[in-house]
Image (tube, grey):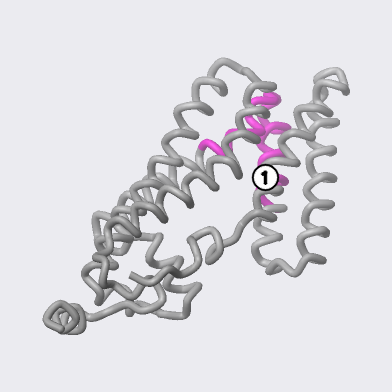
Amino acid sequence: MAQPESLADLLGGRRAALDATVPPVVFVAAWLIGGRSLWIGAAAAIVAAVGVAGWRLRAGDKPRAVLIGLLGVCVAALVALRTGRAEDFFLLQIVTNAASALLWAVSIVVRWPLLGVIVGTVLGQKTRWRRDPALLRAYCLGSWVWVAQYLVRLAVFVPLWAAHAVVALGIARGVLTWPLVAACLAVSWWVIRRSLPPEHPGLRHPQSAVDAHADRLA
């Protein structure tokens, strides 16, 4: 198998992690400093999100991705203000992780693993990767790592949210964002490489069943 760039190289995402770390940390800090005022915490989080969005746009990130991150912070702040509970700032994160775990699991079951969909789109392959049995299987196995990532977050976030542990939620949000994504990228990449046969040309070169059979005979 060829040695292409890793999933981290293909998918990136380091700057996007700021959306998920900086505003929640600022929210918790401002909430504490402001005498546990939700309005102060929410306002500070939104200001931080706007600052991160501006920095990402100047760095060349896609406007749609940046706006989605900004919108997520605004919705989280509105939810907390509406319920009057600081821990509900993290409720959107809990819901999206639960939905993501379900979506990724379903994609594997129906043989459209989201990891393959995402990488195939990035590489401009459309659906050619699905005609490669080895690559389809590897993407299915690698996608289970992403399901596990979301379940890990839920296992941490839900008990902390139920216990009204706002500060712990802020810390967990930071720890379980980019560090966990980085680990997920590394492990899923390892799973894919171990799953593909040695003669496979790699992610950029999907093979049909006929091509794979011809390579084995060669």
Q: Quadrant of the N terminus?
A: bottom left
Rendered residue at 49%/62% (across/down): 6
Q: Quadrant of the C terminus?
A: bottom left
Q: Quadrant of residue 83?
A: top right
Q: Residues within 10 Å of mark 1 (few under 14, many from 20)?
A: some
Q: Which residues fall within the magenta stretch? A: 71-94
Residue placed furthest toward the top: 163
Callout 1: helix, strand or loop? helix
Asked whether, in this view, residue 166 is left or right of residue 127, the answer is right
Rendered residue at 41%/80% (across/down): 125
**Figure label count:** 1
Does the magenta portion include 72?
A: yes
Q: Nearer the viewer, residue 73 or 201?
A: 201
Does the magenta portion include 25?
A: no
Q: Is residue 212 above or below residue 52?
A: below
Q: Position of residue 129 (x, y in %)?
A: 32, 74
In the picture of the structure, the residue carrying the numbered disc 1 is: 75
